[in-house]
Image (cartoon, rainbow, N blue to C red):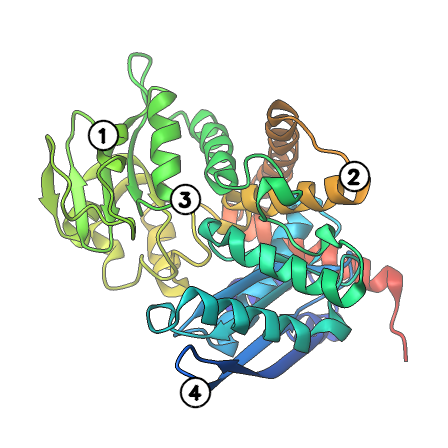
Amino acid sequence: MMAHFDEAARLASIDPGEFEILRRSDREILVSVPVLRDDGSVAVLDGWRVQHNAGLGPYSGPLRIDADVSIEDLRATAAWMTWKCALLGIPFGGAAGGIRLDREQFSKAELERAVRRYIANLMDTIGPERDVFSPDKARDEHVMGWVMDTVSMHRRSTTNAIVAGKPEVMGGTRHHQDAAAQGLRIVFELAVKHFGLGTERTGPSVIVEGAGFVGGNLAQLLQRDDCRVVGLSDKHGGLYNPAGLDIAKLLGQRTADGSLANARGDFERLTHEQLMARPCDVYAACAKSNTITLNNCGVLQTKLILEGHHGAVSAPAYHTIRDRGIKVVPDILARGGDTLSGYFEWVQNRMGYAWQSGDILQRMRRFLEEAWVDVVKVHHERGVTLRSAAHIVAVSRVANADRLRGLYA
């Protein structure tokens, strides 16, 4: 994240003082989270909330619950949220929170107690006008419900605008479950049209890395759009068929944890690197950060990478990919759908009004198309990559907002 920020700040000629401000978080909070276990023992967990920059508005960002969560990871995610919101024209700054907890070792009741204590410890620094939470994964809508209820109990009034991605019955917006994939689908269409991928007879061929809420939903949406999804992978490896996979059938065979290990059908099983080496028009990297690295990027046989996860392409690998002429649609643009969904939910909660499905998708398309136009304009005018162009637009907007607000001392 910092490598891309540093490059964008240099290209945008950001003032040295503002550069130092944007390189750091506004606030980083460490909290201890004592949890009463089901057996009567007590576990004390580490929790954080990183609030990166409030130049454009209240902080907003995910709550990550994982055994491997780290402050460095949260700093990067919070900054990515700042740039993403700025690029999309959303009046939010970036934030990210985390609880270091191994879900496999904790019951649902223990997880709920951990989340509620974590939120209670942050009550002085969060709220609909201060810091809004969103889920790290779409399946965590019940976690967002706990966050909302905890804040509401402390405030003695229902405060549903404190979180995005909660169940629809509690004020959650339509499409929050597939918002990331819907956004990727829109940006995919824009990129394919811009770069002229596919043929008149067939749509572009696509390999999707990741079969979960993002990758799996995206693969399904693209197949409905008559794209040929030739590859799909999960944590165990990849499935490949040059004639196209039956995505609906495959996703119907996923296990509870999203695995395709037991899937049956007309395909070849490959390792991740073998799948990466198969030819396609678009490679959608939707699994996790740093899946495309300097060690494996040389095998890619694609014309375009759609970055469906923050930092899917590592900084060193990005330069090699650029030199090979492979285009990359960066994460802060490609993954705008879930961020827009969170913003839409916040707006609806504050209005006390729920939009229909068509309204949400129409608004999402408008925001993403406007962001795409802004990025492509800088891409052509400055002769820089799409990634650099996106970061130049985002960083410049945040720096300008900070400049206009001034320094309060």
Q: Residue at x 20, y 37 (%)?
A: 279
Could you say which disc has been placed on residue 249 in the image? 1
Q: Earlier in the sequence, mark 3 or mark 4?
A: 4
Could you say which disc has been placed on residue 352 in the image? 2
Given contact means CB atoms under 8 Å apart, are the residues at marks 3 and 2 in contact? no
Which residue has dot 4 on it?
A: 41
Could you say which disc has been placed on residue 323 in the image? none
Indicate the amino acid at tag 3.
Val
Q: How far is mark 1 from mark 3, CA to CA?
A: 17 Å
- Mark nearest the camera among 3 and 4 is 4
Q: Earlier in the sequence, mark 1 or mark 2?
A: 1
Q: Position of residue 32 (x, y in %)?
A: 57, 85
Q: Residue at x 31, y 58 (%)?
A: 291
Which residue has dot 3 on it?
A: 214
Where 295 sits versus 89, above or below? below
Q: Earlier in the sequence, mark 1 or mark 4?
A: 4
Who is closer to the viewer here, 153 or 367? Answer: 153
Q: Is residue 381 visible in the rendered structure shown here?
A: no
Q: How far is mark 3 from mark 4, CA to CA?
A: 37 Å
Q: How far is mark 3 from mark 2, CA to CA?
A: 29 Å
Who is closer to the viewer here, 2 or 134? Answer: 134
Q: Position of residue 267 (x, y in %)?
A: 11, 34
- Mark nearest the camera among 1 and 3 is 1
Who is closer to the viewer here, 236 or 197? Answer: 236
Q: Earlier in the sequence, mark 4 or mark 2?
A: 4
Query: Which quarter of the image is occupied by the C terminus?
Result: bottom right
Q: How far is mark 4 from mark 2, CA to CA?
A: 42 Å
Count of labels shown? Answer: 4
Q: Residues within 10 Å of mark 1 (few under 14, many from 20)?
A: few
Mark 3 falls on what kind of element? loop
Q: Residues within 10 Å of mark 2 (few under 14, many from 20)?
A: few
